């Protein structure tokens, strides 16, 4: 059956949709590339946090972790070089001074962590982890139009929260193991700082409305446990504290990846 002239004329409404779909495809490809590099940077953050924990354990004379630390160190070395090789031509930040400075700091830490005290080792690692988070923030900010407001906010704000949790895990375990050092300013001052920053980040993220309320609720419970440890009201077993903090850290890393992967984040205002 032949279509009427009126139907043929009405097909003009399809043209704007087709043009819109064509325009969306390059943006979708760009956003997926950004998500790809975001996942790589998140993995770097996790490996650096693991390197901090293992090196800190060795500084606390727990020599059983030497082999595991060597493996993580080698993995980080390969990953940092691969990131620059794979993404340097696409994202200018990997040729920038902040990235070069981060690479230099990592090399210095890798070669000299054995000569540091526990608190300095923690701070040096945290500077690196937050440096990687800042690289991710830079990429997300520069490509906010491709990511959309929701995913940009997740990439910019949530990774730092995970590092505050990581520092509270590391310092808390140290305090539990060495109760006599509970008044050590070098340890307690950063502990209070990261607790304050964690609370601020949770409040900001809760106000945005992008995070799962159940994750926020579990994180508030973690804050209460950390406050109890800081105030000397509770001294959990090291294994229990490590498990509590690690579960929360892993949940946030998972939430960041899920939020970046969700293309609907591009529509969040």
Image (tube, grey):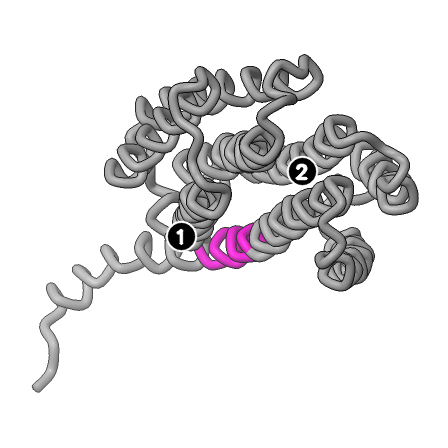
**Which quarter of the rendering shows the C terminus?**
top left
SS class of the residue under badge 2?
helix
SS class of the residue under badge 1?
helix
Is 25 magenta? The answer is: yes
Residue at (76%, 54%) from the top-left corner? 63
| Residue 16 percent coordinates (x, y) | 32, 52
Give the mark nearer the N terminus: 2 vs 1: 2
How packed mark 1 is, by other alpha carbons closer than 10 Å (few <14, some 14-19, many 20 or more), is few
**Which quarter of the rendering shows the N terminus?**
bottom left
Asked whether disc 2 touches disc 1, contact meaning CB atoms under 8 Å apart, the reply is no
Residue at (37%, 44%) from the top-left corner? 265
Residue 230 lies, with reference to residue 153, above or below; the image says above
Is 161 magenta? The answer is: no
Closest to the observer, 178 or 23: 178
Residue identifier under label 1: 258
Residue identifier under label 2: 129
Question: Which dot, 2 or 1, sits closer to the camera?
Answer: 2
Q: Quadrant of residue 208?
A: top left
**Left or right side of 67 for 249:** left
Residue interval drawn in magenta? 24-35
How packed mark 2 is, by other alpha carbons closer than 10 Å (few <14, some 14-19, many 20 or more), is many
């Amino acid at each position: 059956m032949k279509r009427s002239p009126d139907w043929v004329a009405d097909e003009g409404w399809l043209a704007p949709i087709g043009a819109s779909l064509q325009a969306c495809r390059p943006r979708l490809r760009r956003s997926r590339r950004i998500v790809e590099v975001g996942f790589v940077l998140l993995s770097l953050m996790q490996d650096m946090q693991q390197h901090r924990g293992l090196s800190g354990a060795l500084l606390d004379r727990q020599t059983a972790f030497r082999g595991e630390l060597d493996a993580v160190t080698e993995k980080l070395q390969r990953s940092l070089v691969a990131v620059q090789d794979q993404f340097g031509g696409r994202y200018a930040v990997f040729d920038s001074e902040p990235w070069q400075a981060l690479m230099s700091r990592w090399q210095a830490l890798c070669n000299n962590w054995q000569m540091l005290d526990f608190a300095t080792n923690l701070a040096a690692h945290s500077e690196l982890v937050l440096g990687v988070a800042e690289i991710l923030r830079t990429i997300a900010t520069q490509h906010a139009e491709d990511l959309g407001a929701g995913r940009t906010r997740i990439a910019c704000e949530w990774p730092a929260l995970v590092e505050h949790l990581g520092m509270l895990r590391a310092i808390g375990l140290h305090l539990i193991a060495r109760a006599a050092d509970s008044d050590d300013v070098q340890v307690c001052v950063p502990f209070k700082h990261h607790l304050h920053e964690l609370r601020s980040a949770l409040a900001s993220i809760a106000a945005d409305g992008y995070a799962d309320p159940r994750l926020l609720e579990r994180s508030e419970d973690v804050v209460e446990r950390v406050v109890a440890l800081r105030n000397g009201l509770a001294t959990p077993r090291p294994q229990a504290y490590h498990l509590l903090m690690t579960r929360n850290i892993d949940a946030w890393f998972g939430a960041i990846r899920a939020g970046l992967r969700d293309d609907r984040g591009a529509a969040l205002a």
